Image: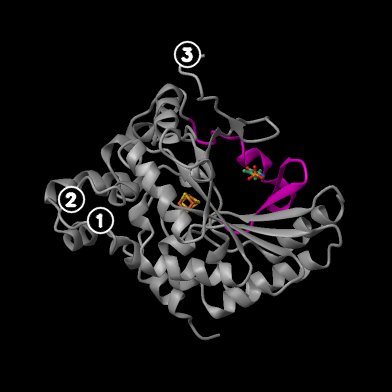
Amino acid sequence: MSVAPWQREWRDAIRNPASLLERLGLDASLLAPAKRADQLFGLRVPEAFLERMEPGNPADPLLRQVLPVDAEASDTPGFADDPVGDHASLANGGVIHKYRGRALLIATGACAINCRYCFRRHFPYADASASKGQWAEALDYLGGDSSISEVILSGGDPLSLNDRRLGELSEGLVAIPHLRRIRVHSRMPVVLPSRIDDSLIGWLAGTRLTPVMVIHANHPHELDARVAEALQRLARHGVRLYNQAVLLRGVNDDAQTLGELGERLFEIGVQPYYLHLLDRVRGAAHFEVDEREAGELMRALAAVTPGYMLPRLVREVAGEPWKVPIQWATGDGS
Ligand SMILES: *Cc1c(COP(=O)(O)O)cnc(C)c1O
Ligand code: SF4
């Protein structure tokens, strides 16, 4: 099969800390720590995302999401390898069925970008596509439980699979009569917008299942004109679009940035959905914003924002039947 432009861009993503620093004209003193932390979880950033960073700014909010730093090596109590208990659920051919009515399928472990705060940094799954045998097992599971009406393709990033593989998967899904919706959780439209090509749209919008996509952007600078164009094409083809963000220290931990993120998402046709408190994964403690401060931010945001632009502040808690809403309306700290 010929190589699509997005596959070439993905292959050419920057993986070398020295190249990243050089491209952005950043101080060489950042190199030694970046090389150390790169050993823990590899640097990976596609050109299309790097282009949106401000050259010469070591505190750029997009750079902070991808640059390996020494803080990742510190061990902080309460921060674990598998904070939300997903590893334990990896049985069943990659199906994680924790919430009623929807089941999540780990379609692949691969991603186009490596986000430093990600719970995936310690996951044991290979950077390879799920095997066919595993998918058969997943389809059996989904087909055997008629309470499931929505399948969520997640990962990793499910859109790192090529369209032929996605097509094979959805053929199996379409044949399950009780499935009504297909939801894709992907950061691709943001980090590699060329992924949203005709072939992908044909796949996602071309079945009887109602297509939903939940993208992942944390800062308004991530949403440039190319991203907007990709999302608008999805919307024109009937894909419902939502965004989830993670509240990250030094990236989006102020009400003005969160407000602009909501405005920008709305402008390009995406509904703000969740604002997640950080999953407490080992190596990411320096990104954490605690519940009290998150509540203050939400109150400041709500005071100046239309309700429909306000994300829901949530935390994932192992064993709970939903993403747990964080109460922020009163500041009594309870
Ligand atoms: C987050 C998540 C979902 C989706 O939850 P929604 O509230 O419907 O967005 C489904 N299954 C699992 C295992 C999840 O972690
Ligand atoms: S799963 Fe999402 S947050 Fe984690 S590295 Fe991949 S794109 Fe980033």
Nearer-the-camera pick, 113 or 37: 113
Callout 1 crowding tier (Cα within 10 Å): few <14, some 14–19, many ≥20 = many
Q: Are marks 2 and 1 in contact (CB under 8 Å)?
A: no
Relative to residue 120, is residue 63 drawn left or right?
left
- Secondary structure under badge 2? loop
Q: Amino acid at mark 1?
A: Pro
User: Quarter of the image containing the N terminus?
Assistant: bottom right
Q: Amino acid at mark 3?
A: Asp
Callout 3 crowding tier (Cα within 10 Å): few <14, some 14–19, many ≥20 = few
Residue at far bottom of view: 2
Give percent across and percent down for residue 44: 36, 58
In the image, residue 97 lies in the stretch drawn in magenta: yes
Q: Please, is residue 329 above or below residue 81 in the view?
A: above
* Distance between mark 2 and mark 1 Cα atoms: 15 Å
Give percent across and percent down for residue 153: 64, 57
The structure residue drawn at horizontal position 71% and vertical position 67%, both measured from the top left corner, is 169
The structure residue drawn at horizontal position 48% and vertical position 34%, both measured from the top left corner, is 277
Give percent across and percent down for residue 211: 67, 63
Q: Which mark is residue 332?
A: 3
* Distance between mark 3 and mark 1 Cα atoms: 44 Å
Callout 2 crowding tier (Cα within 10 Å): few <14, some 14–19, many ≥20 = few
Magenta-tinted stretch: 80-108
The numbered mark, 2 or 3, whose residue comes first in the sequence reads: 2
- Residue 215 visible, this angle: yes
Q: Which mark is residue 57?
A: 2
Residue indicated by mark 1? 17
